[in-house]
Amino acid sequence: EAQVTQNPRYLITVTGKKLTVTCSQNMNHEYMSWYRQDPGLGLRQIYYSMNVEVTDKGDVPEGYKVSRKEKRNFPLILESPSPNQTSLYFCASSTYPDPGKTQYFGPGTRLLVL
Amino acid sequence: AQKVTQAQTEISVVEKEDVTLDCVYETRDTTYYLFWYKQPPSGELVFLIRRNSFDEQNEISGRYSWNFQKSTSSFNFTITASQVVDSAVYFCALSRVTGGGNKLTFGTGTQLKVEL
């Protein structure tokens, strides 16, 4: 089954404690992306990757890091989480370059930073 | 810069009513894609439709229909005979064809509540 998986699905942490949210897809997609969803703001892109070892900033990259060492994985790293990073995070993947193709979204990760 | 506006923050209807969710977009591109996604209370994002900017044909899928009007930069979504299961947040989104890296620019969403 074609899917994007994220782990963990729920996470409560404290300010400053490094964390990683994993994202994996089994569709051999070139393009992967992270979004955060906040009330009243919709979804905003954090980082994206057009292929292995190719990453770039989205609209709200501050406080986040990513890496793309393998085609299927695109982890999101919060080196020193802060409460303003409390959000719902989505990973997405699609073929590239093909902006008209449907992007497949993961189930989301709810993060609470205390 | 790209922008998507969903002016309706929340809509409440009674089951079986028709409801239209508005989406207005801004882009300088002549070619682009528009999308609608549904986010039920469980939180996942469900793809509903994709529309190419060159294709202004309206589309109907069961109780769902979409009206794309390039002249007014709108891509509105109508649910006919709404049902409780339609209760969700609906997002409209825009994607560039070039230079956008497949990025989706989302609106802020419309919360639809369908009551018995």
Image (tube, coloured by chain):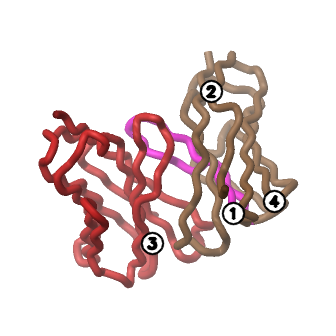
Q: Label 3 amino acid? A: Tyr
Q: Label 4 amino acid? A: Lys
- Label number found at residue A71: 4
Q: Quarter of the image holding residue B55? A: bottom left
Q: Is disc 1 in the same subunit as disc 4? A: yes
Q: Label 1 amino acid? A: Tyr
- Label number found at residue B33: 3
**Which element carries disc 2, helix, strand or loop?**
strand
Vertical placement of residue A85 versus B53, above or below: above
In the visual, does B69 lie left or right of B26?
left
- Counting residues from the start of the chain, the first of labels 2 and 1 encountered is 2
The chain letter corresponding to brown is A
Residue nearest the observer in this picture, B61 or B30 = B61
Q: Which residue, given by chain and number where applicable, does mark 1 sit on?
A: A31
- Counting residues from the start of the chain, the first of labels 1 and 4 encountered is 1
Q: Residue at x 75, y 37 (%)?
A: A77
What span is in magenta? Answer: A31-50
Q: Is A33 a magenta residue?
A: yes
Q: Which residue, given by chain and number where applicable, does mark 2 sit on?
A: A10
The quadrant of the rendering that contains the C terminus of chain B is top left
Do the residues under discs 2 and 1 have CB atoms within 8 angstroms? no
Shown colour of chain B: red
